[in-house]
Image (cartoon, grey):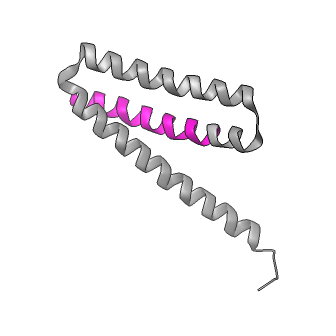
Amino acid sequence: MKILFFAIGLILGILQLLLTKKTVDCLTEKNNSRLLAFIIIKLALYAGALSVMFILMREYLVYFGIGFGAGMIISAFANFIITVSKDKSNNEGDDTP
């Protein structure tokens, strides 16, 4: 059971970081309708996951939290690697020093 709740937290952590990235993209593009939708989805995921975990499975809340944090860190690191590799491939054809 501990591994299951760790995995659920990991998946939700990854989803939250991806939704945060989409929310920031909508904010910079000034797309208010999509921005509001992503904020509502993020809050619904937080509220749903935490309320179910807190009410039904309180003894596994720590494993869920550890998985959530790990998911955020892993997805942030992967996002950084992808962004850096895209920047390098875009700058390879650039001859300016």
In the rendered view, tell whether residue 95 sits above or below residue 39.
Answer: below
> Is 1 in front, or is 30?
30
| Left or right: residue 87 compared with residue 53 | right
Q: Identify the residue at image location x=70%, y=38%.
A: 26
Question: In the rendering, at what x and y percent does residue 21 appear?
Answer: 60, 43
In the rendered view, tell whether residue 21 sits above or below residue 47.
Answer: below
Question: In the rendering, at what x and y percent does residue 24 appear?
Answer: 64, 42
Question: In the rendering, at what x and y percent does residue 12 appear?
Answer: 43, 32
Q: Identify the residue at image location x=58%, y=28%.
A: 39
Name the residue furthest left: 59
Examine the structure image and report whether residue 91 is included in the region drawn in magenta.
no
| Quadrant (top left, top right, bottom left, bottom right) of the N terminus | top left
| Left or right: residue 23 compared with residue 46 | right
Question: In the rendering, at what x and y percent does residue 34 appear?
Answer: 71, 28
In the rendered view, tell whether residue 48 sits above or below residue 92.
Answer: above
Bounds of the magenta segment: 1-22
| Left or right: residue 26 compared with residue 60 | right
Q: Identify the residue at image location x=62%, y=28%.
A: 38
| Left or right: residue 18 compared with residue 86 | left
Q: Is the magenta stretch mostly helix, strand or loop?
A: helix
Question: How many numbered marks does the figure carry?
Answer: 0
Examine the structure image and report whether residue 2 is included in the region drawn in magenta.
yes
> Is 62 in front, or is 4?
62
